[in-house]
Image: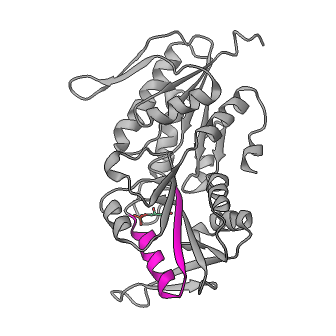
Amino acid sequence: MSDQQRRLQIFSCNSNPDLAKSICEHIGIPLGDAQVGKFSDGEIHIKLNESVRGSDVYVIQSTCDPVNQHLMELLVMVDALRRASARTINVVIPYYGYARQDRKARARDPITAKLVANLIQTAGADRVITMDLHATQIQGFFDIPVDHLLGVPILASYFKDKGLENIVVVSPDHGGVVRARRLAERLEAPIAIIDKRRPEPNVAEVMNIVGDVAGRTAIIIDDIIDTAGTITLAANALLDHGAKEVYTCCTHPVFSGPAIERIRESNIKEMVVTDTIPLPDHKKLDKIKVLSVASLMSEAIIRVHNEQSVSKLFD
Ligand code: R5P
């Protein structure tokens, strides 16, 4: 295949323009020239100002708040690229929203993670590159390749450089144990699990801790911090059980509703997050450290484009 046929172009919608620019800088190509705006009634309007005919195109867009608008921008962008004869359309979704409704937890629940997968595929995407899906089985909701990157190597390397001692890595619930184990292995630390139970209906939840945390530096890891209820309660439970200090980390800082107030007032020493979701100025606190996924994402794009293995990036 000639170089001309394998032309790589990157476009961004509106969710994460800084990350998109940073990915382009890492790869060494300019960001594609496109306008992603709205008509006066709110409908999404896309204008591609350069040809994409025959190109392998990567679209960077997190489906974070405002979720519905960002999702629709992505779908309209994919449609525009398909109709403009892009060779392949690869959607890079650092944060995949709607992922927490991934099964029918109660009768008559929707499964929005699958609905969004259907929409992206129907719009014309050929591949998805994403990161720390809330449930890994969402990969199977697509019938196109999904490259699923992990935030743990980035978080682990930050904590390693801090030189913390006597660490215990904590999962704030049973669902996050595999993730906690991955971080613990890299930090050569044991794990603990917060076991939330409601002994009887209408009786307050009790937080038991499985594992030894007394006198240790705890690092809680979650995929998402949304209202920060889970993480701040977990931090309190660890301190009540004798943890020396509590660090927290996650890949996706959704930070909705009371999150920033809760984090500000919490006993959490530091909260480490990534830039899969951008933080506006009013959500920036001294104790929140943001690590970039740009280098990981750009490496994944280059590997996919060159048809090389992506699994090396999990090491
Ligand atoms: C739940 O299963 C997720 O992993 C997170 O723990 C949850 O989404 C965090 O939400 P919040 O910050 O609102 O407690």
Q: Residue furthest left?
A: 40
First to last magenta residue range = 228-251
> Which quarter of the figure is the N terminus placed in?
top right
Which is more toward the observer, 127 or 47? 47
Where, by quadrant of the figure, is residue 22 drawn?
A: top right
- In the picture provided, is 145 more to the left or to the right than 269? right
Query: Where is residue 31 shown, x and y percent of the image?
Result: 52, 22
Which corner quadrant of the image does residue 310 belong to?
top right
Judge whether residue 279 is colored magenta. no
Count of all numbered marks drawn on residues in the image? 0
- Its colouring scheme is one colour
Residue 260 on image: x %, y %: 34, 60
- 135 to 7, vertically: above or below: below
Q: Kindly identify the residue that appears in the image at 44 percent across and 42 percent down.
A: 63
Would residue 32 be visible to someone looking at this image? yes
Q: Nearer the viewer, residue 228 or 109?
A: 228
Query: In the visual, does 241 lie left or right of 199?
Result: right
Give the residue displayed 53% in from the left and 61% down from the top: 249
